[in-house]
Amino acid sequence: MKAVKAYAAKSADTPLEPWQLDRREPGPTDVEIEILYSGVCHSDIHTARNEWKGTVYPAVPGHEIVGKVTRVGESVTRFKAGDTVGVGCFVDSCRHCRNCNDDLEQYCENGHTQTYNSLSQDRKTITYGGYSTHIVVTEHFVLNVSDKLPLANVAPLLCAGITTYSPLKHWNVKKGDKLAVLGLGGLGHMAVKLASSMGAEVTVLSRSKGKEADAQRLGAKYFQLTTDPENMKSMAGSFNYIIDTVSADHDYNEYLALLRTNGVMILLGAPPNPADVSAFQLIGGRRSLVGSLVGGIKETQEMLNYCAEHNISSDIELISMDQINEAYERTLAGDVKYRFVIDMKSLK
């Protein structure tokens, strides 16, 4: 075992603080990674504060990881020391169910292993994430990262990037499609960049007029305020797709009404409470309300390659590890454009 420095939540209502954890020595198929950058996802906050329940303390969040390979196991063939790599939202799966065989490890029928606060495949060991100096991951779940983009800006692609890329590809969003992005935050700003790069006509739907200039800079053609009831009525039947990134409770019916016939509203945000959905909003226009969860390893690598080719990365604010508690509060207040990333050398 190797002792490494980390930051951990010790309980739901106390700040994250320095901690030390033990990483396993690399086995035959393992890759040891020195973490350079770790993105801060809203899921980190939900977990640290036990808002989704089931948090095991101490909890070390972080699933947007970019780093350098330091050691590899004897059977590793795809990586060597010094390679630039990434680790996303999960670090293992059963690898033999139907979904795993179809490169959909995120939907592993036997339960994938998330990067933190999750049971390893041995069903005993709890995982610890990227708020640490090193991590050890089996080769299959390690991703190649291009040096074409700033590595700090690449880190959020491992969650925010793939979470938005996967549904855009699955529902075949293409040139000429009219697509709305609800919420311009960590997920939303990536959805705008990616959808516009695919040729879609993108509209940002937001409660904040102050985000209009950013929406256009990121690639949106239009910006619409959702706080004006008359404005919402004027958009009825406008969109082929809506990407809903909002994690707070909101009325899905308002936005389903903005879809055209056969339109699809894709849920990426995870509000804490169940929502009431009118059957008539779906039946009346043969509309669909669907959800999507990140992407498999093959698709995540495809996304990283696509972003490198098209010069797409996240807009970030780089912070030191000891600023994490302030960053959580600012994330909740919407005071970040558009993703915090921790410079992990500040922990060494």
Image (cartoon, grey):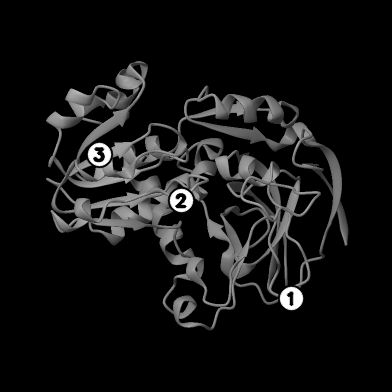
Counting from the top left corner in percent of width and height, residue 197 is at: 26, 42
For marks 3 and 2, the one nearer the N-term is 3
**Disc on res. 180:** 3
Q: Secondary structure at mark 2?
A: loop
Counting from the top left corner in percent of width and height, residue 298 is at: 44, 66
Identity, as a three-letter code, of the amino acid under mark 2: Pro
Identity, as a three-letter code, of the amino acid under mark 1: Asp
- 81 sits left or right of 107 in the view: right
**Nearer-the-camera pick, 325 or 95:** 325
Identity, as a three-letter code, of the amino acid under mark 3: Ala
Whether residue 14 appears in this view of the structure is yes
Residue of label 2: 274
Circle 1 residues within 10 Å: few <14, some 14–19, many ≥20: few
Q: Residue at x 38, y 31 (%)?
A: 184
Does residue 39 lie above or below 285 as drawn? Answer: above
Counting from the top left corner in percent of width and height, residue 256 is at: 24, 45
Q: Residue at x 34, y 22 (%)?
A: 214
Residue of label 1: 122
Q: Secondary structure at mark 3?
A: strand
Badge count:
3
**Nearer-the-camera pick, 58 or 336:** 58
Q: Secondary structure at mark 1?
A: loop
For marks 2 and 1, the one nearer the N-term is 1
User: How far apart are labels 2 and 1 at the CA level?
Assistant: 32 Å
Q: Which quarter shows the C terminus?
A: top right
Circle 3 residues within 10 Å: few <14, some 14–19, many ≥20: many
What residue occupies the far top of the structure in this picture?
A: 210
For marks 1 and 3, the one nearer the N-term is 1
Q: Which quarter shows the N terminus?
A: bottom right
